């Protein structure tokens, strides 16, 4: 039986969901953060990031959510999948998939009469990537899925139409990496 709590550290304002498993292993995960939003012609797509630390191993949790009246395209992540993050200083950081093959699952929202597809995967940081991500803003993200590669432009400020909230995705790692170190 797991226990989930939301905590807020006073000094750095990191907000976590903490899962305590039966074996006593604690997993700290930051809240999901909107990195990309595309709303067009009744369809919407969202990319969320969160960070976890499991027994000293930092992990980027990636989630792709698509919804619309039609069936959203199926995306999959496999062992060869990667996330390439271009930084404002020109460097490119590569994150490596920690997931076996997983594809987006389909759900139906009867209230809004939308089909919703959710893909969730985990990615590992490479050596020295923490230092680069901690010092420079993000300008661009490229995700290599199992069958195609998709680019996501990252905004300095993202006013979410769907969430009714402002996000600052280019500063995500600068503001959040300290929460899992």
Image (cartoon, rainbow, N blue to C red):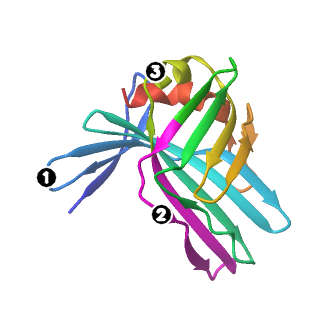
Reading the image, the residue beneath label 2 is 102
- At label 3, counting other C-alpha atoms closer than 10 Å, the crowd grade (few under 14, some 14-19, many 20 or more) is few
Verify CB contact (< 8 Å) between mark 2 and mark 3. no
What residue sits 49% from the left and 56% below the top? 78
Quadrant in which residue 68 is drawn: bottom right
What residue sits 60% from the left and 54% below the top? 145
Image quarter hosting the C terminus: top left
Going from the N terminus, do you reach mark 2 or mark 3 first? 2
Q: CA distance from mark 1 to mark 2?
A: 26 Å
State left or right for residue 59 relative to residue 87: left
In the image, residue 134 sits, relative to residue 152, either above or below, namely above
Marker count (numbered): 3
Reading the image, the residue beneath label 1 is 23
Reading the image, the residue beneath label 3 is 128
What residue sits 63% from the left and 83% below the top? 110
Going from the N terminus, do you reach mark 1 or mark 2 first? 1
x and y percentages locating residue 103 in the rendered image: 53, 66
Magenta span of residues: 95-122
Q: Is residue 4 magenta?
A: no
Name the one closer to the observer, 23 or 163.
23
Image quarter hosting the N terminus: bottom left
- At label 1, counting other C-alpha atoms closer than 10 Å, the crowd grade (few under 14, some 14-19, many 20 or more) is few
- At label 2, counting other C-alpha atoms closer than 10 Å, the crowd grade (few under 14, some 14-19, many 20 or more) is some
């Amino acid at each position: 039986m797991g226990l989930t709590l939301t905590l807020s550290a006073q000094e750095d304002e990191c907000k976590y969901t903490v899962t305590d498993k039966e074996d006593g292993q604690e997993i700290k995960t930051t809240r999901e953060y909107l990195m990309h939003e595309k709303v067009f012609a009744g369809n919407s797509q969202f990319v969320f990031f969160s960070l976890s630390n499991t027994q000293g191993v930092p992990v980027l949790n990636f989630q792709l959510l698509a919804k619309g009246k039609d069936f959203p395209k199926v995306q999959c992540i496999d062992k060869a999948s990667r996330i390439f993050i271009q930084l404002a200083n020109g460097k490119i950081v590569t994150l490596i998939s920690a997931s076996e093959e997983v594809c987006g699952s389909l759900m139906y929202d009867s209230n809004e009469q939308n089909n919703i597809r959710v893909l969730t995967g985990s990615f590992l940081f490479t050596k020295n990537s923490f230092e680069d991500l901690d010092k420079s803003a993000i300008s661009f993200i490229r995700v290599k899925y199992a069958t195609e590669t998709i680019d996501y432009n990252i905004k300095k400020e993202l006013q979410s139409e769907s969430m009714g909230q402002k996000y600052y995705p280019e500063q995500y790692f600068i503001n959040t990496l300290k929460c899992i170190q």
